[in-house]
Image (tube, rainbow, N blue to C red):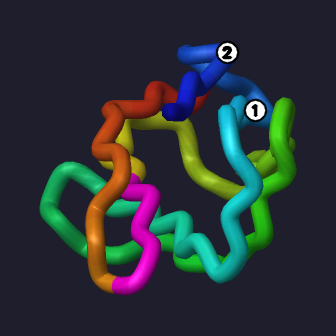
Amino acid sequence: IFSIYPNPVQEIMNIKSLEELRGVKIIFENLLGQKIFEDTLNFVVGENPINIQYLLQGIYTMYVVKNHDVLLVKKVVKK
């Protein structure tokens, strides 16, 4: 249902969605499991850019959540 690119990413990460979704939470956690970022977005069909330039270089776990259901878990490398 989703594809994430590029990975590794420098500033803008795209989440490609096959369907329109409202009220989707994007959560980034560091390797210690600490929540670093959370935002609620509305996805359109196609590319949905997310600006992550403020994240420090490293490896994060990204969650895509809708109505408390985890739709995607992905490791993201920030350059």
In the rendered image of this protein, does residue 53 appear above or below residue 28? above
Report how far apart the C-alphas of labels 1 and 2 lie in the structure. 7 Å
- Residue at point 46%, 26% (across, down): 77
The disc placed on residue 36 is none
Label 2 environment density (alpha carbons within 10 Å; few <14, some 14–19, many ≥20) = some
Our reading of the magenta stretch's main secondary structure is: strand
Front residue of 79 and 44: 44
Q: Contact (CB < 8 A) between labels 1 and 2? A: yes
Q: Amino acid at mark 1?
A: Asn
Magenta residue span = 63-67
Query: Mark 1 = which residue?
Result: 14
Front residue of 10 and 15: 15
- Residue at point 75%, 32% (across, down): 14
The disc placed on residue 6 is 2
**Taking 75 as reference, is 47 left or right?**
right
Front residue of 31 and 62: 62
Please identify the residue farthest to the left as the structure is shown.
Answer: 32
